[in-house]
């Protein structure tokens, strides 16, 4: 919803071929998501640092919207990047997000 800061987005990162979860449990492994509007492929709007679920061995991270959420309705794209202590893996598949206007308040 445009302007909302919740809910957090749960992302499960898996091996494309086997479907097995990617192990993110190393303490030096971090996950970041870059968000951009679908219509502007050259500029990222924001970067979100992921929080590992549990130890990270299941490949799951939560992405908490920052204090500057998706402010307007529209189509957004999210790209996930894993940093293994300086070695980077960008997840090929893009996550598409649709943000719509909230209903108007009841008078």
Image (cartoon, grey):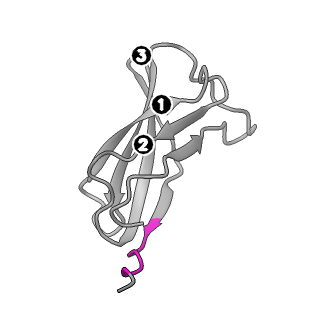
Disc 2 to disc 1: CB gap under 8 Å: yes
What is the secondary structure assignment of the residue under circle 1?
A: strand
Residue 46 placement (x, y as % from top left):
28, 48
Q: Residue furthest bottom?
A: 107
Q: In this view, does 36 lie to the left or right of 19?
A: left
Q: Name the residue under label 2.
A: 64
Residue 27 placement (x, y as % from top left):
49, 13
Q: Residue furthest top?
A: 27
Question: Would you call the spot at circle 1 few (<14 residues within 10 Å), some (14-19), or many (20 or more)?
Answer: some
Magenta-colored segment: predominant secondary structure? loop
Residue 101 placement (x, y as % from top left):
38, 76
Question: Would you call the spot at circle 3 few (<14 residues within 10 Å), some (14-19), or many (20 or more)?
Answer: few
Q: Mark 1 points at which residue?
A: 51
Q: Which residue is drawn at 49% across and 61% down?
A: 96
Label disc, if present, on residue 21 of the rendered structure: none
Q: Which residue is drawn at 74% across and 39% down?
A: 19
Provide the residue span drawn in magenta. Answer: 98-105
């Amino acid at each position: 919803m445009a302007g909302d800061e919740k809910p957090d987005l749960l992302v499960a990162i898996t091996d494309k071929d086997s479907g097995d979860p990617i192990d993110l449990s190393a303490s030096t492994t971090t996950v970041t998501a870059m968000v951009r509007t679908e219509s502007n492929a050259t500029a990222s709007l924001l970067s979100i640092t992921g929080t590992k679920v549990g130890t990270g061995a299941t490949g799951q991270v939560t992405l908490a919207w920052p204090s500057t959420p998706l402010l307007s309705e529209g189509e957004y794209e999210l790209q996930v990047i894993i940093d293994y202590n300086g070695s980077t893996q960008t997840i090929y598949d893009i996550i598409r997000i649709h943000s719509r206007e909230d209903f108007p308040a009841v008078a």
